[in-house]
Image: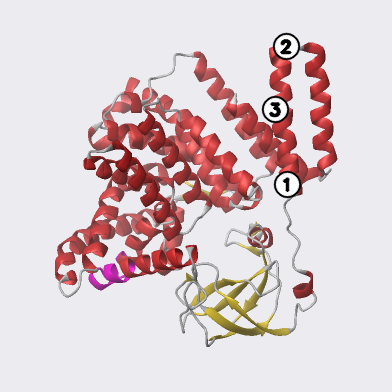
Amino acid sequence: MIYSFVVSFILGIAFEQVFNFGWSLSLLSVVVFFFIFLILRSENSRLWFLCSIFFAVGILRMNFVDTSPDENLSKMVGEKISFEATISEEPDVRDGSARYTVKPSSSKSFVLLVSDRFPEFKYGDKISVSGKLDLPKNFSSDTGLEFDYISYLAKDKIHFLIYRPEIDPTSSSSTGLRGTSKIISFLYSVKKSFIEKIGNVVPEPNSSLLAGVIFGAKQSLGQGLLDDFKKVGLIHIVVLSGYNITIIAVGVFFLMSYFGKRNLSFLLSIIFISLFAIMVGLSATVIRACIMAFIAILAKFLGRPADALRWLFIAGFLMLIWNPLILFYDPSFQLSFAATLGLILFSQYILSFISKHKIAKFIPTKFGIREIVASTLAVQIFVLPLLIKMSGFISLISFLINPIILPLIPWLMAFGAITGALGNIPFIGTMLSWPFGVLSYFLAQITISLTEFSARIPFATLQTGSISLFVIFVWYLFYGFIYWKLKKVSPPTPSYFKRGEKEKLTNVL
């Protein structure tokens, strides 16, 4: 039943986004279905009535979304302005530039500053800004597809840009942090220290790859290498996907379980994952994965059976309640939700198909390779319509390279994290971290070399161009029909009911 409610809520959001009828329609839908329920008084009418409630809530939630820019700033577009502000997000530092999100006083809109990389500023710094105020513009990718950059920023209330502004610290710089902001600033400094210590032992671009798989800090990898990761379908390992969060959640939970006290293990796991989510930035992917991790750990703590699909819908519902615009303008949320849904619905059917046919001879079960192949196929096939819509190409090599690279990622993350942790020990940190840094370097080099080699293979990618939303809708209806047909056959027992406790939680997430 929860699936019907969440889908109704999503339909309400989408309906209001398309038709913009306002809150009156939501009230009308509730009234109509209420009278139907009174007249019929059947179980189906009750379900339809409750679904109409969630449909109405979706419409109402969209009516409370304010995407309009600040009027005072709108009048100054094209003019040079000066103001003081506090950096409200972790800086987005890239090879030759840095991006700072600030909010001028008495303004409801944020301003994105695209500045030189140096001098560097950090989260919480009070700065003085001077520059020409502009509006963001949509842009086209290398494949010719237009990216709606305006709406992408507007979902986070960023409506204005200043390119190459003059930025100076104010006399009270870094003194405006209080309470939660101090904790966030501390976590950002911990992450920065980890990345610096890794960089002291591991050379580039391997150190940037380690920073990417652990913290999602992919900007210093360079555009060429990032493009290669995209071409071979491995970009998810350096953008802190749900896969990375899963590894961390599993590791933390079972590490904490050695304390012996269930209550303490549960509490420490929740606290650590929450702090880590803040440290790496609360992107849509991180939030979804963390919500599912919380619910998974809670289910384990309470001794209740796992239901990954229900957890996914709960996570999506909570995120859309918080910001419904991510449904339309956040590619990270769309791909993350679709990938997890495909993994849950189809991975076990694909695994069963592989195991029952001759192809099983070529895909061993050791090291979980067969399950990795099944999971990769399920995810890649399910997100294919969205990937074509967003990128305009298909990675044909991803089905081969993912099963080879993914088993290395947990070890890469573990050795990289140990390198950064030991490197922070005063005086002897570099010496202690060096052996783990060497291991991290070689694993990262294997990953980079295989990625670059695969990206150079002829026909590794197939240019397709974009597809319409209608085609995507029909495509997913077809997936739904396939799943409905498969459910008529006795479904295979999910692997997380067959294995040990660690594997259970990993597969559920």
Left or right, residue 212 beside residue 69: left
Image quadrant containing the C terminus: top left
Q: Determine whether, in the image, residue 243 is placed left or right of residue 282.
A: left
Q: Is residue 397 above or below residue 161?
A: above
SS class, disc 3: helix
Front residue of 232/277: it is 277
Q: Earlier in the sequence, mark 2 or mark 3?
A: 2
Examine the rendered structure and indicate whether residue 435 appears above or below residue 14: below
Quarter of the image with the N terminus in it: top right
Residue 258, given in percent of the width and then of the height, sits at 22, 41
The x and y percentages for residue 336 are 51, 45
Question: Mark 2 — residue?
Answer: 42
Q: Which residue is mark 3?
A: 51
Of residues 153 and 42, the one nearer the viewer is 42
Q: Can residue 486 be spotted in the picture?
A: yes
Residue under label 1, please give it: 62
Amino acid type of the residue that numbered disc 1 sits on in the rendered structure: Met
Tell me the amino acid under the disc marked 2.
Answer: Ser
